[in-house]
Image (tube, rainbow, N blue to C red):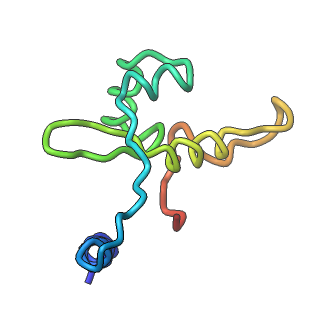
Amino acid sequence: MTNKIKLIRTLEQQVAGGFTPQIEALLSPEQTAAMIQVKPNTLAKWRVTGEGPAFVHIGRAVRYHPRELARYIEHQTRRSTSEASTGGGRGYHNNDPL
């Protein structure tokens, strides 16, 4: 069973039990671009090349989870210009567990 299916089943059980899950609002590409000070077209290009923050497809809509955006920003953090890249541009892979 995939993690997504497990999450969906857990949420369904919680809702059936009267619990209202607290789900963070997802960000649009325009909101995300404004937050990291790039153009929405840059995010679109990054989605094609695998760069940039992880995103979610809901139907035809593209959205960004605030947690993934924070993770992306964390991977971009450097202490000096000579510090080696740890990912985030080309080669950034979002394989870390949430």
- Whole-percent x, y for residue 82 in the image: 83, 33
Q: Residue at x 58, y 49 (%)?
A: 71
- Whole-percent x, y for residue 46 in the image: 39, 32
Quarter location, residue 3? bottom left
Q: Residue at x 38, y 41 (%)?
A: 26
Measured along the vertical axis of the image, is residue 14 above or below residue 74?
Answer: below
Q: Residue furthest front?
A: 18
Q: How many marks?
A: 0
For the N terminus, the quadrant is: bottom left
Measured along the vertical axis of the image, is residue 12 above or below residue 30?
Answer: below
Q: Residue furthest bottom?
A: 1
- Whole-percent x, y for residue 78 in the image: 78, 38
Measured along the vertical axis of the image, is residue 79 above or below residue 21?
Answer: above
* Image-based side of 20 in relation to 16, left or right: right
Q: Residue at x 43, y 49 (%)?
A: 24
- Whole-percent x, y for residue 27 in the image: 39, 35
Q: Residue furthest left?
A: 59
Q: Residue at x 32, y 76 (%)?
A: 14
* Image-based side of 54 in relation to 48, left or right: right
* Image-based side of 14 in relation to 67, left or right: left
